[in-house]
Structures are given as structure tokens and as C-alpha cells.
Image (tube, helix red, strand yellow):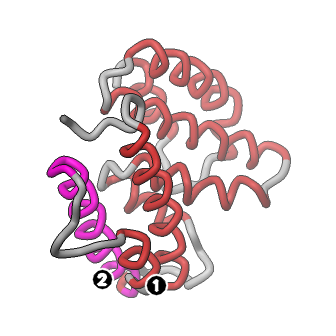
Amino acid sequence: MRFDPFESRLCRDIRNGLGHAFVLALQAKDLRPFTQAAGPHPADPHPLPVRDYIGHRQACLTRLLEQIPALPVKPEDEMPVSLLLWNLELFFEFHEWMEIQWRSAAGPEKKAGQALILCAVTYEHFLYGRKIPAQKAAAKALALLNEYRESLPEIFDADLLIQKNVRP
């Protein structure tokens, strides 16, 4: 077995539950929401790929929580955390995090946020070998990136996102 949330209900449920808990932990700047959602510890009945996925996510979250206080931004500025998630290739968590920002956005900023979310969806599909869904998400992302590039948060390089979404 390999961890694949598109082929396994167990993996999908774990990814979705932990993704939500990951965001709660980031918001609280506290690992506990994640560790509570991760569930059983030493006698964990999950297959090794699932345990590896959980362990990897927990290690990334721990690193993020250590890095966030050192960010040279106001505590309410959410975008640097988004970039950290992206750079760690935590595309599902990036999607979850950005969706919070997207819900409260309006106009061109909302469309730019949608483009970033679709970029993450593209990469999430590619990670699991889902080429056709990735290409469909990339096409939607590219259209939005090209149209709303001026509304992207400054820390995201529109040209690089466009270049990489053509051929991730």
C-alpha cells in the first residue's frame, strides 16, 4: 500500500482530517490540535505509509511553528505562512489555509486567491500521478493567473507560477 487519498478512503479521510487540524494548529500556533487529530500513537493500527504521512506532516508543522515567530511581518499577515506551506510542498494544507483567506476576499483578490488554490490543486494531483485532473486544474489556474496576476499577493511571483503551472 502507498498513501494515496485519491484511491484510498482511509488516506483521504486522514488527509482531510489532518489538513483541517493542521490549519487549526497554525492558527493557534500550537501543535495540540494536530496531535489530537492524529489519534493513536505507539500501538497505531494504521499501515506504515499512513503513519509516515502523519509523521511527515507533524514534522513539517513543528518546523513551521518554530519559523512563524521569526517572520518579519505583523501577526495578522497570513501570506508569509502561505508561502512557507508552498515551499514545503504541503499543497493540500496550502489549499486549506488559502481557502480561509479566499472566503473573506472580494473582487480581483478573490479570483487571484482562487488561482493560487488551483495551483495547489494542480500540484496535489501531480504528486499522486493524476495527470488529467492536474492538467484540468492547471488550465483553470493559468487562465486566472493571467487575468488576475496584478491582484496576487506580492510574495507570489506570477511569472514563476505561470511558468511552473504550464509544466509542473
Quadrant of the image occupied by residue 148? top right
Residue 112 in the image, given as x and y percentages of width and height:
67, 42
Q: Is residue 97 left or right of residue 166?
A: right
Asked if the stretch drawn in magenta spans residue 67, the answer is: yes
Q: In this view, which residue lies farthest toward the top?
A: 132
* Mark 2 Cα-neighbour bin, 10 Å: few <14, some 14–19, many ≥20: few
Q: Residue at x 23, y 75 (%)?
A: 41
Query: Marks 2 and 1: CB-CB under 8 Å?
Result: no
Label 2 or label 1, whichever comes before in sequence order: 1
Residue 52 is situated, as x and y percent measured from the top left of the image, at: 18, 55
Q: Secondary structure at mark 2?
A: helix
- Magenta span has 62? yes
Q: Which SS type dominates the magenta stretch?
A: helix
Indicate the quadrant where residue 32 lies: bottom left
According to the picture, the residue beneath numbered tag 1 turns out to be 29
Say which amino acid is labelled 2: Glu
Q: Residue at x 32, y 53 (%)?
A: 87
At which x and y percent is residue 19?
Answer: 47, 58
**On screen, residue 105 above or below 146:** below
Name the residue beneath numbered marker 2: 66
**Quadrant of the rendering where the C terminus is positioned:** top left
Magenta stretch, residue numbers = 47-69
Horizontal arrangement in the rendering, residue 151 relative to residue 159 (left or right): right
The residue lying at 57 percent from left, 69 percent from top is 78
